[in-house]
Image (tube, rainbow, N blue to C red):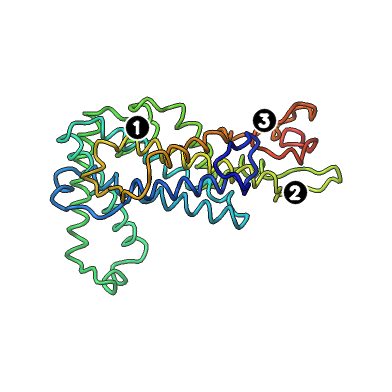
Amino acid sequence: MPEDTDGPIHRWTPLDVRIEAVERFADCTEHVLTVGDLQWADVEKDYRLLAVNNSLRRQQESIRAAVLLSRHDLGHLAVAFVCAALEDVMHLGFFASLDLEESQELFVSMGNFDSLRALLAQRNYVGDKEMARLWYPKYFLEWAVAKSEESRAVLRVLKKQYGWSGGIVPTGVWVADRVGQRELYDYLYAASSRALHFSVGEIMRRGWVEATGMLVTDKPAFREHLASFALDRLWRLYVETWRVAVPMLDRAGISSDGSLEDDEIVTAVARLMETSAVPLVHAREWPIPPTTAPPDNFIPSHVGHTTVLDR
C-alpha cells in the first residue's frame, strides 16, 4: 500500500491497492451501518425490515470474505458472492415499491413456500424413517405437505395478480424488469451464475493457449481480473442496497456507532471511485490484435495468447 493512503489511486489499479481500498470502505461502512438485532414487534408488521437487516449483514460479510480470499490469491472465487448481492438489490427495490399490505402478503407467501419446499425436499431425500430420527414426527410432515399446497395456491393467485411468468415465485428477470434494472441484472447475472453453476462458457474462458501449445487453466492475470471484478461489484452493490434500504434502516436494527466523521466514508467511497469499474469480459478474451491498448484494471501479461475463438 502506498504511504499516501489518502491520495488518488491510478485507474490501472494493482490488486493489492484495490484490496486496501475496499477493506477501508468495509471498515467505514461497518461503523456507519452497524447491523444489530431487531424488535420482533416491528418485523411482524413489516417483514422487509428483516430482509434489509439480513441483506446488509450478508453483504458486509461477503465484502470481508472477498478481501480475505483476494489476499490469499483466491479472490476469483468471490465472483460467486455477486449473485446474492445482486438479488438483494433487486428484491429489496421491488418490495419497497409495494405498499405495506401487498408486501406483507407476498413476502409471507414466498417465505412459507420456500421454507416448506426445503423441508419436503429433505424428506423426499432421506425418507420418513430418517426424518423421525431427526425429530420430525409424521403428523408434522403431513401438516407440511398440506401447508405447502396451500402456499402454492396462494402464490398462484398472486402470480395472476402481479403478472409474473414462469414458476410459482417471481423470477429474477421479472423482478429486475419491475425495478427498471434489467440491463444490470443481465450483465451481473451472467457473471455470478457462471461462477455458481456448471458453465461450458466459463470453462472455455478459463483456458489460455500459450505459444508453446500448452493450455493454461490458471492464468494469474485472469484470476486477478476476476478478483478485481468481484471486489469492485460487491462494494457498488452494497451502496445500492444501502440506498434502497435508507427509509427502513432505523427500524431494521441498523445504526451508526458515531465513531466516524462523515468525510471519512466520503473519502473511502471517492477513493474507490478513482479505481474505475472493472468489466466482466476482458478484451483479451477475444481475438483482438495485441497492439490494441488494454483497458484499465488489467495486467496485459498475456497479450498475444489465443482465445476460445482460435481453438
Q: Residues within 10 Å of mark 1 (few under 14, many from 20)?
A: many
Marks 1 and 3 close (CB-CB < 8 Å)? no
In front here: 134 or 85?
85
Indicate the amino acid at tag 1: Val
Badge 1 or badge 3: first in the primary sequence: 1
The image quadrant of residue 304 is top right
Q: Where 129 falls versus 78 (above or below)?
A: below
Q: Which residue is mark 1?
A: 175
Indicate the amino acid at tag 2: Val
Residue at the image point whose x is 42% and y is 27% from the top? 182
Residue at the image point whose x is 49% and y is 48% from the top? 24
Indicate the amino acid at tag 3: Pro
In front here: 151 or 138?
151
In front here: 264 or 299?
264
Q: Which residue is mark 3?
A: 295
Q: Position of residue 221 (x, y in %)?
A: 70, 44
Q: Quadrant of the C terminus?
A: top right
| Left or right of residue 174, residue 273 in this image | right
Badge 1 or badge 2: first in the primary sequence: 1
Q: How many marks?
A: 3
Q: Which residue is mark 2?
A: 216
- Callout 1 secondary element: helix
Residue at the image point whose x is 32% and y is 34% from the top? 244
| Left or right of residue 252, residue 81 in this image | right
Residue at the bottom extreme? Answer: 133
The image quadrant of residue 175 is top left
Viewer-nearest of discs 1 and 3: 3
In front here: 206 or 164?
206
